[in-house]
Structure formats: C-alpha cells, structure tokens
Image (spheres, rainbow, N blue to C red):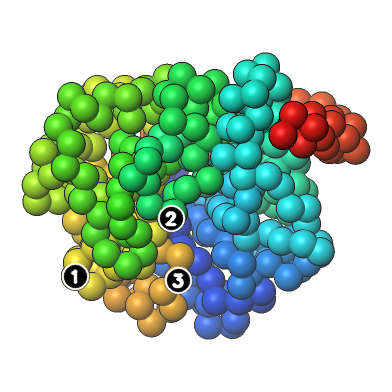
Amino acid sequence: MSSNPRPRRPLPAIFGCAGPELTPYECSFFTDIQPLGFILMGRNCVNPAQVRHLTAGLRALLRHNNAPIFIDQEGGRVARLKPPHWPKFPAAGTIGAIYEYDPALGVEAAGILGNLIGHELRQLGITVNCAPVLDLSHPEMHEVIGDRAFAADPAAVEVMGRAYAEGMLRQGVLPVIKHLPGHGRVCADPHHVLPVVTQERSELEPDFAPFKQLAAMPIGMTSHILFKKIDPDNPASQSAFIINEIIRKQIGFEGLLISDDLDMKALKGDLLCRSQQVLAAGTDLILVCNSGVAELTQIATVLPPMSEATWDRWDRAKEFLLPPSGPFDTVAANHRLDMIMAVMDLAN
C-alpha cells in the first residue's frame, strides 16, 4: 500500500506585493516560489471589493491550504485600512487611558476593539493581524511605539492585550503578539537605525511579563533591537540566545515566530544576508513588506523551504483559525465603544 509523499513545504516567508492589483509578473513569481503567505500594506488597500479580490487572488497562487494574509491594523495611527471605506478605531493608548479611569471599562473596550477589527478583516479575507502590541509604555519610549502601547503596568497590558487578542480570535482572525521580547525601552526607530537597550536582563523582567502571560497565543513577532547586556552582537530577531533562552524558555512562547519587517534599516547587510541570519537564529518566518520582486528574487531561490518544526508551529497556529463564533452585531459593538469613549470625555 503506497502513500502520497507530503508536498514540498512553502518558503518560510511572508511577502508584500506592489499595488492594489497583482501584476502578471507577480502572479508568475509567487506561483513559482510559493511563500507561506502575504502581507497587505496601505498601497494595497483601496476599497473593500478590491481588497477581497486581491486576497482571493493571492491565495489562488499558493498550493497550500489556509495561506495566511497578514496586515497591521492595530487601531490609532497604525492602520492600513483607513476612512472613508473603513472605520478609524482608537489607539491602544486610548484604551489604556480608559483602563486607568476604570479597569473594567478598559478591558471591555479592548475586547470590543479586537472584535470590531477582527470582523472587518475577516470580511476582506485577511486572517492574521499584527497586533496587539504588548510593549510597555516607558518614559524614554520612542514615538515609534508611543500610543501604540496600552500602558506602563505589565498587568494592565496583559489583561487589555488578552481581551483584544481574544476578540480577534472570536472573529476568526489570528493575533500576533509583538514585539518580542519588548520594545518599550528603545529611544530610536528601527525603521532608520538599530535601537540599543542597555538595561540588565533582570531589569527587563517587567517588559517580558505581558508576553509570558500571553505565551499561548499562536503567533509572535520578534524585534530588531540590540539588548546589549543579553546579546551585545545581535539584535533580537537575529539572536539565537534571545530567541532560545529568552523568548522560548524564559517567556515560554512556543508558537510561530515571525520577524519584524526585514526592510527596516536597523539590520545590516543585503536582504539575503538579513533573511539567512534571522532564520539561522531560530525565527520561523521572515517578513518582507516593501521590497519589490527584483529584491525578493535574490532570496527566493536560496532560502530553504519551511522546516518541519516551523510547519508544525504553523499547523498549531491554524488550529486557532476558526470561523467566527456566531453573528456579530457591529452596530451594537460600535455603539457600546462610543458610550465608553463618551464616559471618558465626560470624566476629563
């Protein structure tokens, strides 16, 4: 009795595309290289019908089932889907201010926000959202995070982050906890330079805490930050020690690890070098948001397919990817969120 061999695993990569419609060359290229999935940026999102057409077209290029399509739709200023076609949702920092006034209302607001964003994404064929941000809000924090952080208190970040993530899961969208092992102490923007954190490992325990409490979530994102007292030579996304000893063991995160965008200037070397170092360190997937097909071609023929361990983590992540738990009344949810926001306005 013969059995069919397991098909070749896809590339351990999430790639962006150039515009609101796939070009013939992109269709041919992505069909040939078979990445695990894609990420949508603002340039890819014009209106709901167009996005639905694009997500369906991207999936049709790939041979594996349930190919993930990612987006950054946190609420606040990090939102690829913008008015007038999509609602403007509050930032995590706004939810944190509600929590500071009334913890129960803050947690409720975080859950509603996760539900609303998840519902919007699911209608468009988007199944993974790079949120919630679990970084702590430190006084020295660079504005690249700023109001994207819920709060300074690890326990508050944990309960709001959990409510937000569970809200998305109820709508059939996978959350991505970020930026492991913590981004809140940086004074520079990794889009432009490599941020350096100088605190001792013991001082960083509070920053690790929200990630530890949400370590059962399916997907996490690593950061391009140099933790000088932990690994003086490699940023977290390229540090085998940080990934294995801090993220996997101390924090206890066993899910799928994706890098932050490799197009950021925090990392040295060309795209191939960056990709190889990230994967060699133990990150499961590379994320490349803005490079064109010419740059992607440089790495697509060199990268190995996903490892068995990464494929297994993706299989486990997909177990979270369930249909929405039931009908969701967006009108009532938006009304309730507006009421909570109004309470805050009156209090101030």
Determine which quarter of the picture holds residue 290. bottom left
Q: Residue visible at 61% across and 72% down? A: 43
Q: Residue visible at 58% across and 62% down? A: 40
User: Pointer 3: what residue?
Assistant: 290
Q: Position of residue 233 (x, y in %)?
A: 9, 51
Give the quadrant of the N terminus.
top left
User: Pointer 1: what residue?
Assistant: 269
Rendered position, 84 above or below 106: below
Give the quadrant of the C terminus.
top right
Within-10-Å neighbours for mark 1: few <14, some 14–19, many 20+: few
Nearest to the observer: residue 115 or residue 273: 115
Q: Nearer the viewer, mark 3 or mark 2?
A: 2
Answer whether residue 207 is visible to the viewer in this image.
yes
User: Pointer 2: what residue?
Assistant: 144
Answer whether residue 254 is visible to the viewer in this image.
no
Within-10-Å neighbours for mark 2: few <14, some 14–19, many 20+: some
Q: Amino acid at mark 3?
A: Asn
Q: Position of residue 90 (x, y in %)?
A: 68, 44
Q: Residue visible at 31% across and 42% down? A: 185
Element at label 1: loop
Determine which quarter of the picture holds residue 24. bottom right
Element at label 2: loop
